């Protein structure tokens, strides 16, 4: 544990998004990794699932959102355009309002929230102006996104505005649906039909710029010698493409001073409505527009980076694949989790907390890792924070500045959540965390399903071996258990006493009082036999009025049939179910005893006890 005073405790900046827009989410989180931020705050990034209209999925998302409340947030940043679900967004906003903290809403105006607005139009105008003015392009085409999409239409208007102001011909507008493959297909078709290259093709995002460049390259054209191509958004693939893509990227760092000022001086009574923080873009010139030359040293560094990330990706998926494969036959989640440490050898410096929600107030930590040391099978009751050691993590000298959190779930059921902690992260770290979460979900689903399967089989087995009326073993279950006992080495040399029991007068009870009373009498006798046999005996109802039970004892005991009958009938007479009935529950009993050794023949001892029981019944009838 860390020694600290309250002034050393940081709060969290909670960021909520989805992994489907990983790049933008990661760029924002990384922009917060400044000394000014992390000295007072830990960044906690919650990644939610793919937006869907299924009620079960939404219920799980809302359940996960409640954990935001336990992360001790100083503020919430909500990427509403990623989350897309209004109910989930409202849930998160409500958490912020109830905690009296500022809520920042990215690209989505919301009452009571500070709006983070990306200046797309301004940035796209600057990119268009760069192409026209700095590269002297006179004829340009544009590769837009989806037709009639508001983001696409906004960029078309920005491009047209600059072209008209500069007296340049915006010749054609094509639609590549914001993806590389559709853009490549559009360009392939154009070239096949005799496309006349313009001076520049301005693309509405980097992905379409990559597809456009690939098509041009495949048809023998060289970018930017034959035509300039530019992108927008600043995705990482553009930096490693040949040629590298000239683009503009969101400059989230520009809004950090304003954001920190709002957080530190926030007055819960002040209105945030209409307060907008504009986020500018920064232009990143590269090879596809000719601003950056193709040099071997630059490409060598890029190859090294890509090779390192690729090796990490391969190794992590290999180790996680091995881990999950081993868990497919397991039914105990603690055993599975304990095996996990064998596969984290490259990433053991990270912080790990894997939680399964066992009840409303119990968190079962199946795996905890910090500084290469691991703990298992921990349970925390009424845990106030998202982590049991949250105060330690929030200490300024904890060495952990970033927390990544996601839900452990199947398609229809949520099991818990996983948290990883880092001093600093890059895109590959966050990718690896999401992979880790997916593998953990697969492991948990497999183990839980195995447990359910085993429990179901046990239930079926119990039903198939139990008498439906009394709950005693039926003939099948009784003899399976009895045969297992007499061949068990632990019972060798002990003595088996077998009791055959037949209820007297059941037909008379049925005929005079009805079968319901007959069933009650059978149930009462079964309870009496069970009580006599206690923990050391096996009891069975063969069917009808026939019962049996067996006792295993260290020493042979003299059996008093009359005394046993008296005890069992006494139990029945005092049973609350039949104490006031107009009939008496009686039984005939036969007993046989034999040492458990190689000479024991179960059929012989059963026949012996049956014969004794019939003699007892005849004797009682004659009396």
Image (cartoon, rainbow, N blue to C red):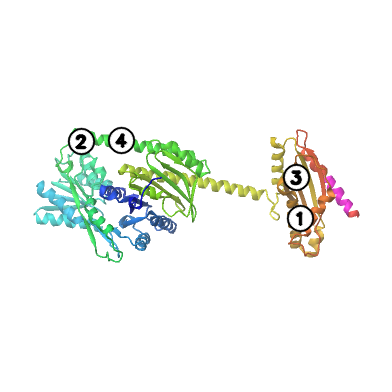
- Identify the mark at residue 525; answer none if there is no mark: 1
Locate residue 287: give its quadrant. Answer: top left
Q: How many dots with numbers?
A: 4
Q: Residue at x 44, y 57 (%)?
A: 56
Which quadrant is the C terminus positioned in? Answer: bottom right
Residue 403: x, y in percent?
35, 48
Q: Kindly report the distance in space between the C-alpha atoms of the residues bearing marks 1 and 3.
A: 16 Å
In this rendering, the label closer to the viewer, 2 or 3 = 3
Q: Is residue 522 magenta?
A: no
The residue under label 4 is: 308
- Say whether disc 2 or disc 3 marks the residue closer to the N-terminus: 2
Between 437 and 564, the one lying in front of the other is 564
Provide the secondary structure element on which disc 1 rests.
helix
Q: Which residues are magenta?
A: 610-620
The residue under label 2 is: 298
Relative to 557, 450 lies left or right: left
- Say whether disc 4 or disc 3 marks the residue closer to the N-terminus: 4
- Say whether disc 1 or disc 4 marks the residue closer to the N-terminus: 4
- Say whether disc 1 or disc 3 marks the residue closer to the N-terminus: 1
Provide the secondary structure element on which disc 2 rests.
helix
The residue under label 3 is: 550
How packed mark 1 is, by other alpha carbons closer than 10 Å (few <14, some 14-19, many 20 or more), is many
Between 51 and 472, the one lying in front of the other is 472
Provide the secondary structure element on which disc 3 rests.
strand
How packed mark 3 is, by other alpha carbons closer than 10 Å (few <14, some 14-19, many 20 or more), is many
Provide the secondary structure element on which disc 4 rests.
helix
How packed mark 4 is, by other alpha carbons closer than 10 Å (few <14, some 14-19, many 20 or more), is few
Residue 275: x, y in percent?
24, 63
Q: Kindly report the distance in space between the C-alpha atoms of the residues bearing marks 2 and 3.
A: 84 Å
Q: Is residue 279 visible?
A: yes
- Vertical arrangement, residue 13 with respect to residue 188, above or below: below
């Amino acid at each position: 544990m860390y020694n600290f005073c309250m002034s050393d405790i940081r709060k969290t900046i909670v960021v909520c998004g989805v992994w489907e827009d990983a790049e933008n989410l990661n760029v924002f989180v990384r922009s917060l990794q400044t000394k000014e931020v992390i000295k007072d705050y830990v960044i906690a990034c919650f990644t939610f699932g793919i937006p869907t209209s299924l009620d079960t999925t939404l219920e799980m998302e809302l359940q996960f959102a409640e954990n935001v409340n336990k992360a001790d947030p100083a503020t919430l940043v909500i990427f509403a355009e990623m989350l897309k679900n209004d109910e989930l967004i409202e849930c998160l906003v409500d958490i912020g309002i109830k905690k009296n903290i500022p809520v920042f809403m990215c690209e989505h105006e919301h009452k009571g929230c500070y709006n983070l607005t990306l200046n797309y139009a301004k940035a796209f105008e600057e990119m268009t102006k760069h192409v026209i003015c700095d590269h002297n392009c006179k004829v340009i085409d544009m590769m837009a996104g989806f037709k009639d999409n508001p983001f696409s239409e906004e960029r078309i208007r920005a491009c047209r505005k600059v072209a008209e102001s500069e007296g340049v011909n915006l010749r054609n507008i094509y639609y590549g649906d914001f993806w590389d493959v559709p853009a490549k297909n559009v360009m392939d078709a154009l070239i096949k039909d005799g496309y006349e290259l313009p001076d520049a093709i301005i693309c509405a995002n980097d992905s379409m710029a990559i597809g456009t460049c690939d098509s041009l390259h495949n048809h023998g054209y060289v970018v930017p010698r034959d035509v300039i191509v530019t992108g927008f958004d600043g995705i990482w693939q553009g930096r490693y493409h040949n040629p590298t893509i000239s683009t503009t990227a969101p400059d989230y760092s520009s809004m950090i001073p304003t954001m920190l000022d709002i957080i530190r001086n926030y007055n819960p009574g002040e209105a945030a409505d209409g307060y907008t923080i504009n986020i500018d873009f920064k232009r990143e010139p590269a090879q596809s527009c000719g601003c950056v030359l193709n040099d071997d040293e630059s490409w060598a560094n890029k190859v090294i980076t890509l090779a390192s990330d690729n090796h990490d990706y391969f190794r992590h998926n290999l180790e996680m694949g091995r881990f999950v494969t081993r868990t497919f036959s397991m039914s105990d989640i603690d055993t599975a989790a304990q095996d996990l440490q064998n596969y984290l050898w490259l990433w053991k410096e990270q912080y790990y907390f894997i939680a399964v929600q066992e009840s409303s107030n119990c968190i079962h930590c199946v795996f905890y890792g910090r500084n290469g040391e691991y703990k298992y099978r921990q349970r925390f009751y009424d845990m106030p924070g998202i982590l049991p050691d949250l105060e330690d993590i929030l200490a300024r000298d904890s060495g952990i500045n970033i927390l990544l959190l996601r839900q452990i779930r199947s398609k229809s059921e949520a099991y818990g959540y996983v948290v990883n902690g880092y001093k600093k992260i890059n895109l590959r770290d966050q990718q690896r965390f999401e992979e880790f979460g997916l593998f953990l979900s697969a492991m948990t689903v497999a183990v839980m399903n195995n447990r359910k399967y085993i429990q179901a089989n046990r239930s079926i087995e119990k039903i198939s071996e139990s008498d439906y009326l009394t709950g005693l073993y039926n003939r099948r279950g009784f003899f399976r258990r009895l045969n297992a006992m007499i061949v068990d080495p632990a019972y060798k040399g002990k003595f088996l006493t077998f009791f055959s029991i037949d209820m007297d007068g059941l037909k008379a009870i049925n005929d005079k009082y009805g079968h319901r009373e007959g069933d009650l009498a059978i149930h009462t006798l079964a309870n009496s036999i069970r009580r006599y046999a206690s923990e050391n005996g096996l009891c069975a109802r063969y069917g009808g009025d026939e019962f049996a039970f067996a006792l295993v004892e260290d020493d042979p005991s003299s059996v008093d049939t009359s005394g046993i009958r008296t005890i069992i009938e006494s139990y029945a007479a005092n049973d609350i179910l039949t104490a006031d009935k107009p009939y008496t529950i009686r039984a005939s009993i036969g007993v046989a005893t034999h040492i458990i050794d190689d000479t024991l023949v179960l059929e012989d001892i059963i026949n012996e006890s049956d014969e004794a029981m019939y003699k007892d019944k005849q004797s009682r009838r004659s009396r």
